[in-house]
């Protein structure tokens, strides 16, 4: 399986026509994340960042669970007396669930096929898109076992949920389904379970038809400028535009303008220019 990326025990990588499926693979534990899984995910995502065959990355879980959050036994209790092991696992977890995924150089989609609890909210929010099965089950369940959403969870939840909704789910720990997650705008959309894979692949294929250099610059520009003040954002976006024009080997901007203005081949309001 994906020989050049490496061999893995707790995750799976599957590839088809530019789409890379990164699959948490501990279905018997509902894909709860333990330290060996974190180390494998960190290694896999690092390798995929520069993988020429990855045009879109889809994160999902094996079986009927997306991810049941951190492993209470092996990530929490087993490391209570091992501060070095805890620090290593914590770093790997943060690295892949947020740092590498948030600015992964290609578009990312979380396909939420079932349970999504606790720390799973971090990679969920890190992904550019999230498509959930209508009957997927979400929850900030930490309060139910005596802690609060740590790691980066409280922070990423503040990015996507309203103040009222965030506090409601953080303090009650009540579960909610995929339909509700879409209503809360925690996910991009929710679809019937039978259509989940097809809808996710459809979005991935649409993205594969667009200029990958522009896509990368677009997500970096949006995600980074949100954290800036107006003057910083205005200057950064100008510099980023210049960077894209210099870095784009397919000269998308020039092609796009020519195909519309001179050749009248398409309308940018409705579709992408024809690449190649
Ligand atoms: N940590 C450790 N083990 C977990 C786990 C987690 N977060 N989530 C599930 N598991 C394990 C269970 O201990 C069980 O292991 P076992 O078969 O060795 O006994 C196995 O996965 C199946 O779990 P089970 O509860 O029997 O399955 P279920 O389908 O009835 O329920 C959940 C699934 C996800 C609702 C339930 O397991 C659960 O509430 N998990 C905890 C979710 C959570 O609070 N996560 C936040 C962590 S930050």
Image (tube, rainbow, N blue to C red):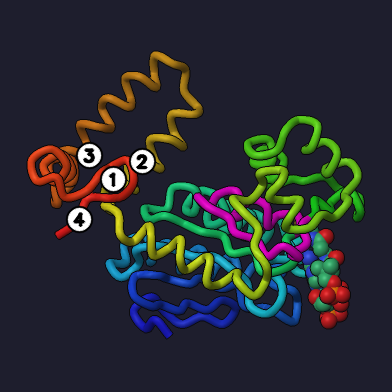
- Cα separation between marks 4 and 2: 19 Å
Assess disc 1: are there few (<14), some (14-19) or many (≥20) residues with their C-alpha within 10 Å of its C-alpha.
some
Assess disc 4: are there few (<14), some (14-19) or many (≥20) residues with their C-alpha within 10 Å of its C-alpha.
some
Are the residues tagged 2 and 1 within 8 Å (C-beta)?
A: yes
Q: Is residue 195 visible?
A: yes
Are the residues tagged 3 and 1 within 8 Å (C-beta)?
A: yes
Q: Can residue 131 be found in the magenta stretch?
A: yes
The reply, left or right, for residue 71 in relation to residue 61 is right
Residue 150 picture quarter: top right
- Cα separation between marks 4 and 3: 18 Å
**Magenta part of the chain:** 117-138
What percent of the width, then of the height, locates residue 21?
A: 48, 72
The residue lying furthest to the top in this view is: 231
Q: Nearer the viewer, residue 47 or 189?
A: 189
Q: Residue at x 34, y 70 (%)?
A: 18
State the residue position of label 2: 218
Q: Which mark is residue 214?
A: 1
Q: Can residue 1 be found in the magenta stretch?
A: no
The reply, left or right, for residue 71 in relation to residue 1 is right
Q: Residue at x 14, y 51 (%)?
A: 250
State the residue position of label 4: 274
Helix, strand or loop at disc 1? Answer: helix
- Of circles 4 and 2, which is in front? 4
- Of circles 4 and 3, which is in front? 4
What percent of the width, then of the height, locates residue 115?
A: 75, 66
- Cα separation between marks 2 and 3: 9 Å
Q: Earlier in the sequence, mark 4 or mark 1?
A: 1
Assess disc 2: are there few (<14), some (14-19) or many (≥20) residues with their C-alpha within 10 Å of its C-alpha.
some
State the residue position of label 3: 244
């Amino acid at each position: 399986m994906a020989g050049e990326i490496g061999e893995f025990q707790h995750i799976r990588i599957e590839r088809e026509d530019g789409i890379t499926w990164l699959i948490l693979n501990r279905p018997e534990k509902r894909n709860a994340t333990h330290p060996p899984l974190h180390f494998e995910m960190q290694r896999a995502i690092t390798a995929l960042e520069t993988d020429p065959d990855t045009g879109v990355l889809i994160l999902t879980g094996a079986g009927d669970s997306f991810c049941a959050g951190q492993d209470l036994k092996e990530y929490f209790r087993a490391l209570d007396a091992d501060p070095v092991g805890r620090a290593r696992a914590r770093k790997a977890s943060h690295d892949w669930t947020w740092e590498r995924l948030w600015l992964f150089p290609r578009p990312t989609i979380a396909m939420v096929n079932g349970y999504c609890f606790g720390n799973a909210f971090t990679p969920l929010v890190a992904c550019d898109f999230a498509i959930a099965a209508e009957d997927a089950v979400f929850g900030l369940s930490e309060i139910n076992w005596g802690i609060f959403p740590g790691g980066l969870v409280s922070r990423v939840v503040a990015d996507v949920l309203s103040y009222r909704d965030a506090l409601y789910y953080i303090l009650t720990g009540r579960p909610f389904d995929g339909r509700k997650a879409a209503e809360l705008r925690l996910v991009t959309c929710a679809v019937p379970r039978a259509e989940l894979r097809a809808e996710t692949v459809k979005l991935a294929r649409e993205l594969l038809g667009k200029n990958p250099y522009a896509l990368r610059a677009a997500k970096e520009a949006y995600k980074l400028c949100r954290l800036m003040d107006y003057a910083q954002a205005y200057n950064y976006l100008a510099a980023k535009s210049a960077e894209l024009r210099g870095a784009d080997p397919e000269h998308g901007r020039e092609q796009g303008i020519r195909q519309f203005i001179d050749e009248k081949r398409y309308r940018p309001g409705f579709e992408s220019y024809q690449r190649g």
